[in-house]
Amino acid sequence: MDLENAKVQMRKGILEFCILQIISRGEVYASDMLEELTSAKIMVVEGTLYPLLTRLKNSGLLDYKWVESSSGPPRKYYVLTDNGKTFLEQLETTWKELQESVAQIILDSYHKKQEASNTETEEQA
């Protein structure tokens, strides 16, 4: 299995959640989202972001408004709808549950490795 592909798939799996989190803070311009996602190493390109924003809007989770810009054409700013806020709350609950579950599995794996290592050490003595 290709490690880079696995990493990309993990990031894609949480992309929607991250986008909704960013928008939940208030009106946000797509290029600002892109910059934040890139700096957080979620590694999104415009070709991924814009179709996802369109899908989220078509699902009723977000909306946008046009704001005039002094330095060019009007800008589209995204906001969460009430449905989007509810959906995000549900995703947050799921995220917390997943974090706890994964942490438990990692901890159990660590303990089992420690037990196996201790057994090996005792057998060698």
Image (spheres, rainbow, N blue to C red):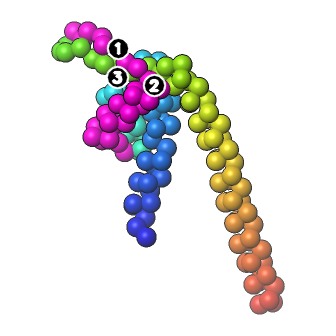
Height in image: 71 above or below 62?
A: above
C-alpha separation, residue under disc 3 versus residue under disc 1: 10 Å
Is residue 33 among what the camera can see? Answer: no
Left or right for 103, reference 42: right
Q: Check disc 1 and report its element: helix, strand or loop.
A: strand
From which residue to which does the magenta span run? 43-70
Q: Check disc 3 and report its element: helix, strand or loop.
A: strand
Q: Residue at x 35, y 30 (%)?
A: 54
**Magenta stretch encompasses residue 58:** yes
Nearest the viewer among 33 and 82 is 82
Furthest-left residue in this view: 72
Q: Residue at x 39, y 61 (%)?
A: 4
User: Considering only order in the chain, which callout, 1 or 3, is on the residue closer to the N terminus?
Assistant: 3
Left or right for 43, reference 69: right
Number of the label disc, if any, that sits on residue 83: none
C-alpha separation, residue under disc 3 versus residue under disc 2: 18 Å
Number of the label disc, if any, that sits on residue 60: 2
Number of the label disc, if any, that sits on residue 65: 1
Furthest-front residue in this view: 59
Q: Check disc 2 and report its element: helix, strand or loop.
A: loop
> What x and y, as percent, mark residue 125?
81, 89
Q: Residue at x 24, y 14 (%)?
A: 74
Q: Give the residue pinned by disc 3.
A: 29
Height in image: 3 above or below 79?
A: below
